[in-house]
Image (cartoon, rainbow, N blue to C red):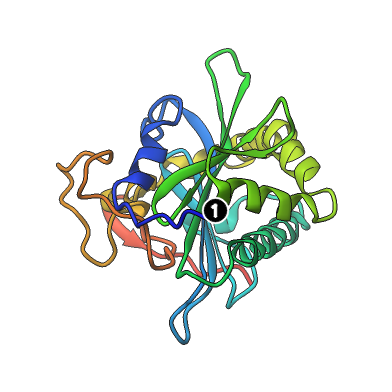
Amino acid sequence: MRVPRPQPWALGLLLFLLPGSLGAESHLSLLYHLTAVSSPAPGTPAFWVSGWLGPQQYLSYDSLRGQAEPCGAWVWENQVSWYWEKETTDLRIKEKLFLEAFKALGGKGPYTLQGLLGCELSPDNTSVPTAKFALNGEEFMNFDLKQGTWGGDWPEALAISQRWQQQDKAANKELTFLLFSCPHRLREHLERGRGNLEWKGEPDLQPQAVLSSLPSRPPASVPLSGPSVSPPLQPTLCPPFLRGGSTFSPPMAP
């Protein structure tokens, strides 16, 4: 089985390949950035996720806390009572899938598996899904909507796809999320919390910066698809928010 060498530029390429510019406010998108590591350092999570509404982070999750939590102004979004329980349930399922993938790859490692999942609303209000995956920094697999399964040219893609197919209704859940759940969630957020998008996060904590090197973040002038960008190796925390020129960090929901 081919073991890829880490390619620090490749996760920037994942973002570069997305339809439209995710940093532009005119593009309404809901994206989940997922990362799993086969050999986490002591006291650090093996899996973590940041969720983004357009250029703004609204969700944080990691395997140590085991709970999806809202970020910034989204703490006060007028959501249904079970919304964050649903996010937590879905991300725990993703955590299980990503960690199962390492079993399919064997013990040669270490491995870093990343995913970029979500959707973007086009000007005609139709949804454009995104489902791309990278292994040790190289894009190697996507989810084929027509086939209803994961695929790629690498033998690792086949091994992981077969492993995931063994999980109960995993492929069907992925398809349902991309085509129905994601656009529904995005439209719900826009309806219930559009005012939250008036809050502005720190510039270097936009979605693109999640894919930049940690802790050695490249300067803002470096293009995201360039060789200086490396995949995230640490969880992304909820950034502070600015309102009226002042930094404000709202409390987390209980």
Residue 43 visible: yes
Is the residue marked by circle 1 packed among few (<14), some (14-19), or many (20+) residues within 10 Å? many
Q: Nearer the viewer, residue 67 or 39?
A: 39
Q: Residue 126: x and y, percent? A: 63, 19
Q: Residue 140: x and y, percent? A: 49, 43
Residue 188 shown left or right of residue 198 in the figure: right
Q: Nearer the viewer, residue 190 or 214?
A: 214
Pointer 1 residue? 74
The residue at the far right in this view is 168
Residue drawn 38% across the image and 60% down it: 239
The residue at the far top in this view is 124
Residue drawn 20% across the image and 50% down it: 228
Q: Residue 101: x and y, percent? A: 63, 60
In the picture, residue 182 is in which quadrant?
top right
Residue 243 visible: no
Q: Nearer the viewer, residue 236 or 26?
A: 236
